[in-house]
Each structure stands twice: as structure tokens, then as C-alpha cells.
Image (cartoon, helix red, strand yellow):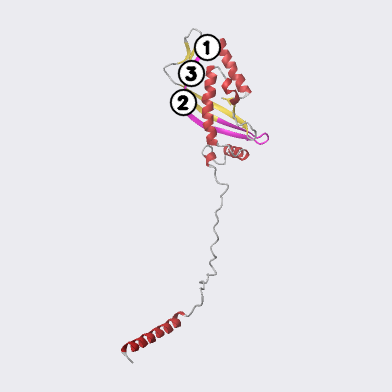
Amino acid sequence: MNGPIIQLLVLAGIAIFLVLRLRGVLGTREGFEKPPVPLDKPAPAKRDFEVIEGGPDRDIIDHADEGTSTALALAEMKRIDPSFNVGEFLGGARQAYEMILMAFERGDLDEVKSFISEDIEAAFTAVIHDRADKGLTVDATFVGISELKLRDATFDQSIKEAELTIRFGGELAYVVRDHGGDIVDGDPNAIKKQKDVWTFARVMDSGDPNWRLVATE
């Protein structure tokens, strides 16, 4: 028997010896056995993607303290009309303030009638007629808004009517002249600052999207 064959036999014997030793230490497994799950550790629950409801609505709590009557009224408005957005409403209120205020100062309410109630129209018209009777003219230019804040919100469940009260800080270049052209109010070289509190109303489930000015302070 030559040398290479003897070496192969020796190596084969060593391999058999090692296999027997390993089987004695580790034991044997058949197939793809799963490791046992400890009884005191429950299997991990399946995680599903769920929509978490009932969390704070940033569109509301950015403008009203959570849990207040104003916040609850805003939530009811959004429930009745899901398209309602507080931030967008305030943006519209900013534009409405300038448009209605300047129409009043010019003495022409025709273009804003759809945005004011009948009572407001009557009150504004009375002031406009009084100015005209006294021969007064108003020269006003809208400069800007220094403040705009939601002060209050209410919702009447019985008629689905919402009311939002806004505090405005307006700035105008404002002069009132008499029939002879003399200044009786205002200053052409100064900016007039004024504070207004306006309340807008709308029936939330109506087909009319317009909010109307219903009260002023």
C-alpha cells in the first residue's frame, strides 16, 4: 500500500472521529426545526397601519385653546361642513374687512351687499346718508391690517348657524372734509389706527358659501 492511500485512510479516520464527537456533544436535528418560543414571552403582535382619530386639530388649536367653547364650536362647524377651514376663513375675513370698510368710507355698498346682513346695510346706509346731508366727504386709503385675531366662535345646533367674532386692527390714511373742502376730521400726514370687532355668520349646511357681517363693535 503506497503512501497517498495511507494518508487518505488516516484523514478519513480522523474525520469520522470528529463527526462522532460532535454528535455526542450537540445531538442531532432533523429538518428545519424552529427554536422553541419561551412561554413567558408572547409572540409579537402584528402591526397594522391604523389612522389615529381624535387627535388635536391643528387648524383649530392654532386659533383657539383646546377644550374651550370656541374650539368646540369650531369642531362642530367642521363636522357639519368638512370643507370649512379656520385658517382659510381668517384669510377671507382679512379681505372682507378691507373691502367692506372701504365701501363704507366711499359711501357705496353695492359691491358688498352679499357680504353684509340687512341690519348692517341699514346701519351703514344711515351713516352714509347723514354724511351726505351734512355735506361731508371722506378721502380714505387702506394701508393695512396690524392685527387679526379670532376672539370667539359659537354654533347654534338648532339652525346650524355659526358665528365667528374677529378683532381687527386697521390702518387708514383718512381725511373728512366739509362742503367747503376744510378738514373736519383726520390728518393727511398721519395714519389713522382703528380697532374693530366684527362678527360674521353663516348657516353651515346651506348652499350659500358666503359669510355675512352681522354685528360690529
Q: Position of residue 52 (x, y in %)?
A: 56, 50
39 lies above or below 210: below
Quadrant where the N terminus sits is bottom left
Residue interval drawn in magenta: 137-165
Q: Position of residue 209 (x, y in %)?
A: 60, 32
Amino acid found under the numbered disc labelled 3: Ala
Label placed on residue 84: none
Which residue is pictured at 60% across the width and 25% down the height? 114
Which residue is pictured at 55% across the width and 19% down the height? 104
Within 10 Å of disc 2 (Cα), the crowding (few <14, some 14-19, many 20+) is: some
- Which residue sits furthest front? 2
How far apart in space, not on screen, are marks 1 and 2 (Cα)? Answer: 24 Å
54 lies above or below 125: below
Label placed on residue 140: 3
Quadrant where the C terminus sits is top right
Within 10 Å of disc 1 (Cα), the crowding (few <14, some 14-19, many 20+) is: some
User: Image check: 142 left or right of 162?
Assistant: left
Residue 141 in magenta stretch = yes
Q: Position of residue 208 (x, y in %)?
A: 63, 31
Which of 141/55 is in front?
141
Label placed on residue 136: 1
Residue 22 in magenta stretch = no
Q: Which residue is mark 2?
A: 144
Q: For numbered disc 2, what is the local secondary structure?
A: strand
